[in-house]
Image (spheres, rainbow, N blue to C red):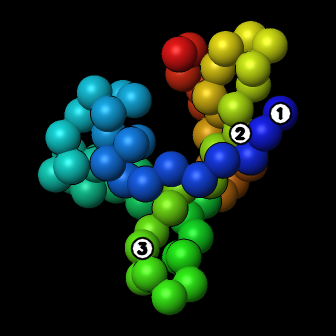
């Protein structure tokens, strides 16, 4: 599995939601988020499973959810 970093726009396009829905559903409270140095940009950490063609998100309380690509 590869660890990847997604921007909020990329996350919204995967789940087909708008940016305001991302904040309304409070995804940013339970997803692992890292701030990129010198860019002040939030990125969401995820794992990419190439074998099963899935993207796997791990929450702060160690639950996982995935999306088939």
Question: Badge 3 local density, few (<14 within 10 Å), some, or many (20+)?
Answer: few
Identify the disc placed on residue 43: none
Task: Please tell me which of labels 2 and 1 falls first in the chain.
Answer: 1
Task: Please tell me which of labels 3 and 2 falls first in the chain.
Answer: 3
Identify the disc placed on residue 1: 1
Above or below, 65 relative to 22: above
Q: Residue at x 62, y 28 (%)?
A: 55
Q: Residue furthest bottom?
A: 38
Above or below, 43 relative to 41: above
Q: Nearer the viewer, residue 32 or 34?
A: 34
Above or below, 15 relative to 26: above
Q: Point out residue 17 in the picture as x, y percentages from the top left corner.
A: 24, 34
Identify the disc placed on residue 47: 2
Answer yes or no: do the residues labelled 1 and 3 have beta carbons within 8 Å?
no
Q: Point out residue 35 in the picture as x, y percentages from the top left corner.
A: 53, 76
SS of the residue at dot 1? loop
Q: Residue at x 54, y 76 (%)?
A: 36
Q: Nearer the viewer, residue 69 or 66?
A: 69
């Amino acid at each position: 599995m590869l660890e990847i970093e997604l921007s909020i726009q990329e996350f919204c396009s995967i789940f087909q939601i708008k940016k305001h829905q991302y904040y309304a559903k409070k995804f940013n409270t339970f997803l692992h988020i890292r701030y990129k140095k010198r860019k002040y940009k939030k990125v969401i950490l995820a794992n990419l499973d190439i074998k099963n063609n899935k993207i796997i998100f791990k929450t702060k309380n160690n639950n996982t959810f995935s999306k088939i690509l």
